[in-house]
Amino acid sequence: DAGITQSPRHKVTETGTPVTLRCHQTENHRYMYWYRQDPGHGLRLIHYSYGVKDTDKGEVSDGYSVSRSKTEDFLLTLESATSSQTSVYFCAISVFPKSHGYTFGSGTRLTVV
Amino acid sequence: AQTVTQSQPEMSVQEAETVTLSCTYDTSESDYYLFWYKQPPSRQMILVIRQEAYKQQNATENRFSVNFQKAAKSFSLKISDSQLGDAAMYFCAYRSAGRGRTGANSKLTFGKGITLSVRP
């Protein structure tokens, strides 16, 4: 399996503070994604990247920004955390061939208090 | 936009029995991929099985098989000889087979998931 790691695994933060989650891959895959998972909603796409400095919004992008300055790293930033952003966040990479779907990181549980 | 619907939030099965998890989707495309992912309590997302829309034959992986009905836009997962380790949340997902530089067609769209419990 492609190496993909997320950090941190757990985080508690206060409302109004900025938070950055990191996703790191070791196999030079072009496409990377950030999803959030909430009960009753499944996984919803926040942002994705199709190359270095190439990113686009997903369906729930408000309040989030991303950056990809290197192929291997995809950062998700909550600019000013709110309680509605309490969630489990997953990073994923698209593996080849496309029919094989994604490989996911182990997720970050973020709690905003 | 594509949508994926899993209408049953929870299901339960007796160990060693068979269970079927339902999934329907909506799309105007003719070529796409469908997936079932398993998420055990560890939170890890694990690919269970995949189906390519242009293939008429239903995919199978050991005890897991799908019933793919393209015209009905239905993609159900059958788990045979259920085991305690099958207890998890299961997600159905859709992906376009289309190409494009930006990767807009590479996104996975998920259903809301179904929690499967296995009774010993």
Image (spheres, rainbow, N blue to C red):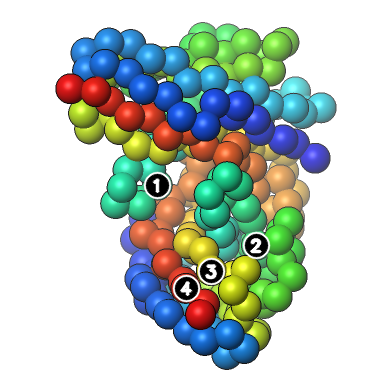
Camera-nearest label, 1 or 3: 3
For residue A80, what is the image quadrant? bottom right
Q: Chain of mark 1?
A: B
Please rate how many residues cluster around mark 3, counting C-alpha atoms within 10 Å: few if below 14, some from 14 to 19, many from 20: some
The amino acid type of the residue labelled 3 equals Thr
Q: Up-down: is A8 above or below A59?
A: below
The amino acid type of the residue labelled 2 equals Ile
Would you name the residue on which mark 1 appears? B45
> Same chain, marks 3 and 2?
yes
Say whether disc 2 or disc 4 marks the residue closer to the N-terminus: 2
Please name the residue shown 57% across and 14% down the image: B68
Would you name the residue on which mark 4 appears? A111
Q: Which mark is residue A86?
A: 3
Q: Which mark is residue A46?
A: 2
Q: Chain of mark 4?
A: A
Q: Kindly indicate whether the residue at mark 3 contacts the one at mark 4 (C-beta within 8 angstroms).
A: yes
Q: Position of residue A69 (x, y in %)?
A: 58, 82
Please rate how many residues cluster around mark 2, counting C-alpha atoms within 10 Å: few if below 14, some from 14 to 19, many from 20: many
Please rate how many residues cluster around mark 4, counting C-alpha atoms within 10 Å: few if below 14, some from 14 to 19, many from 20: some
Secondary element at image label 4: strand
Camera-nearest label, 3 or 2: 3
Residue B52 seen by the camera: no
Left or right, B80 with respect to B73, comes to left
Secondary element at image label 2: strand
Please name the residue shown 40% across and 47% down the image: B45
